[in-house]
Amino acid sequence: MVEGRLIEGVLRGEEAAIARSITMVEERLPGARALLAGLATHTGKALRVGLTGAPGAGKSTLLAALLSALRRAGKRVAVLAVDPSSPKTGGALLGDRVRMAMHAGDSGVFVRSMAGRAALGALAPAAGEAVDVLDAAGFDVVFLESVGAGQADHDIALECDVTLVLVAPGSGDGIQALKSGILEIADLWVVTKGDRPEAAGLKAELLASLSLAADARAIEERVVTVAALGGQGVPALLAKIEQAGAVARAPGSLEPRQLLRLRRRLLAAAAELCAERLPPDAPQLAELATRIKSGDLTVIGAARALLSGGNA
């Protein structure tokens, strides 16, 4: 079977097999579920790092610096960049290799773009499963990157062990990030472009705002300033990422976010199966819709009937 050969290729770290597997998952092609099931027992080893922030916050520049540092340490690294979808084709607006081009040709680095293909601001439904593929492929660190747009931030936090929220001086996105309700999902706040004069002011403003909701000393440890182009602050940030990841992935611990991740995946899988068993032209749907229209049945009552497989 095709998925059997792909599983073997992924476990060997073959780039072609990894790319094909992610495509199968993203496109929901036949065999995708069997593929994921076959890889499931080989996941859980990679450190999953989420990275989000407003456009222009410096995500790609910071990622390139982190990749370089991790490669120098001998780590295999993968990046899954979830880009906005094209309104015409549904594809990602940015190509797979546009970012982190300096690592092209490095067998220890895998970079893949994935179209959002979801409601505005939400993470691609298959993104977490694609990270599972990369995890099973033996990468030590997997970065999941997306443009900060509300729900995407929360989705990334659920899918990752450590979540970075980037803010840049001069863009006004520091306070905006707080307003978007993502305070609770950031493990680390990263002030980028730290060589600019405004960076110190932004960090002070961020610390003051964050300290209103938590212990000031604890918050200060979670705010890091970097100037990625020159490498300043990158080693310190990487150390904090690894420290936070070690806590999140400690043996025997199942954090609330991991439980939420599994619960969300379970509900998504149930919804997919439900949609497959009940296509739009299913007789049951037409019958129940008629009863709803006549007032004989509520939408909730009809949904319960569908889930139970019985009559309303």
Image (tube, grey):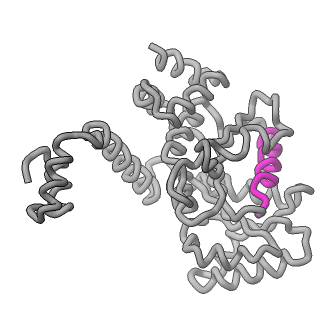
What residue is rendered at 67% in x and 52% in y? 242
What residue is rendered at 71% in x and 70% in y? 223
Indicate yes or no whether the magenta region holds residue 237: no
What residue is rendered at 78% in x and 73% in y? 171
Place of residue 204 in the rendered image (x, y in percent of width and height, measured from the top left): 77, 82
Tell me where residue 106 sits by quadrant: top right
Question: What is the span of residues highlighted in magenta in the rendered image?
Answer: 57-72
Q: Which of 83 and 293 lies nearest the eye of the viewer?
A: 293
Tell me if residue 14 comes above or below residue 82 in the rendering: above
Place of residue 235 in the rendered image (x, y in percent of width and height, measured from the top left): 81, 55
Place of residue 207 in the rendered image (x, y in percent of width and height, measured from the top left): 70, 80
Indicate yes or no whether the magenta region holds residue 71: yes
Q: Is residue 49 visible?
A: no
Q: Which of 13 and 255 lies nearest the eye of the viewer?
A: 13
What residue is rendered at 76% in x and 27% in y? 107
Place of residue 27 in the rendered image (x, y in percent of width and height, measured from the top left): 51, 34
